Image (tube, rainbow, N blue to C red):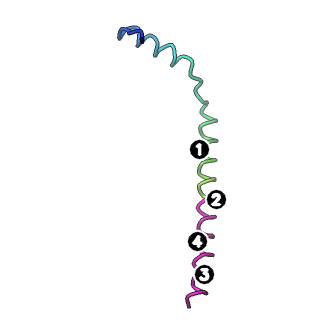
Amino acid sequence: MAIKTTPLQFIQQVRIEVSKVVWPSRREVILTTIMVFIMSALTATFFSLVDLAIRSGLHLIFV
């Protein structure tokens, strides 16, 4: 059977857990954001080239 907590106990527990969170520094956020943009651009380029290759192959087969 679960132990019921009061709203005050719940808020205290939440504050304790939030204090354990390690927040990233501004530099870490900027670097990871840049990495996401770079990886997105590389992925988009890769799939564009794959799409172009498949389209060219199908064009050669059906024309």
Q: Residue at x 59, y 55 (%)?
A: 40
* Callout 1 amino acid: Thr
Residue 42, which numbered label? 2
Counting other residues with Cα less than 10 Å from the Cα at mark 1, is it few (<14), some (14-19), or many (20 or more)? few
Q: Residue at x 46, y 12 (%)?
A: 13
Q: Is residue 17 magenta?
A: no
Q: How many marks?
A: 4
Give the alpha-carbon distance from disc 3 to disc 1, as whole Å: 35 Å
Is tag 1's residue or tag 4's residue first in the polypeptide sequence?
1
For mark 3, what is the residue?
56
Q: Residue at x 61, y 59 (%)?
A: 43
Name the element at disc 4: helix
Q: Nearer the viewer, residue 31 or 56?
A: 56
Residue 51, which numbered label? 4
Give the alpha-carbon distance from disc 3 to disc 4, as whole Å: 8 Å
x, y percent for residue 11: 41, 13
For mark 1, what is the residue?
33
* Among the 4 quarters of the image, the one containing residue 25: top right
Give the alpha-carbon distance from disc 2 to disc 4, as whole Å: 14 Å
* Callout 2 amino acid: Leu
Q: Which segment did they paint magenta?
A: 42-63
Name the element at disc 2: helix
Give the alpha-carbon distance from disc 2 to disc 3, as whole Å: 21 Å
Q: Nearer the viewer, residue 27 or 39?
A: 39
Counting other residues with Cα less than 10 Å from the Cα at mark 3, is it few (<14), some (14-19), or many (20 or more)? few
Is tag 2's residue or tag 1's residue first in the polypeptide sequence?
1
Counting other residues with Cα less than 10 Å from the Cα at mark 2, is it few (<14), some (14-19), or many (20 or more)? few
